[in-house]
Amino acid sequence: MCNAVTDHAIRRHAAEGVQTFAELQARTGCSDCCGACEPEARQCLREAIAAQPSVLSFLPATA
């Protein structure tokens, strides 16, 4: 990715709660020049968010 933002960094930020591409850009500077990496960065973020465990899975089941 550009500006030395790796897919690993994108996954880490998603795990820390980043939910939007705008948040990712603010934290990392990703895709703030020519934008050529934007589609790949957006896809990586979407996949990272989808891979996060749901908060609901940690709640106890109701009887």
Image (spheres, rainbow, N blue to C red):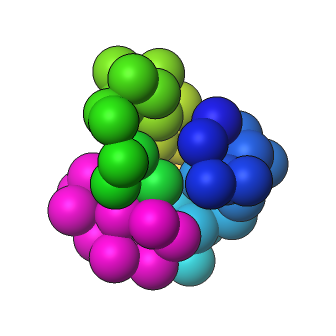
Image coords of residue 25 (percent x, y)? 35, 64
Residue 11 lies in magenta, yes or no? Answer: no
20 on left or right of 16 = left
Seen from the viewer's position, the closer of residues 40 and 20 is 40
- Residue 53: x percent and y percent? 55, 53
Which residues are drawn in magenta?
Answer: 17-29
Which residue is depicted at the point 34% across and 76% down? 26
| Residue 3 left/right relative to 8 | left
Image quadrant occupied by the C terminus? bottom left
Residue 22 is covered by the magenta coloring: yes
Give the quadrant of residue 18.
Answer: bottom left
Residue at position x 47%, y 54% from top? Answer: 30
Asked if residue 17 is positioned above or below residue 7 in the image, the reply reads below
In terms of image quadrants, where is residue 22? bottom left
Report the residue at 29% width, 70% height from top. 23
Q: Quadrant of residue 46?
A: top left
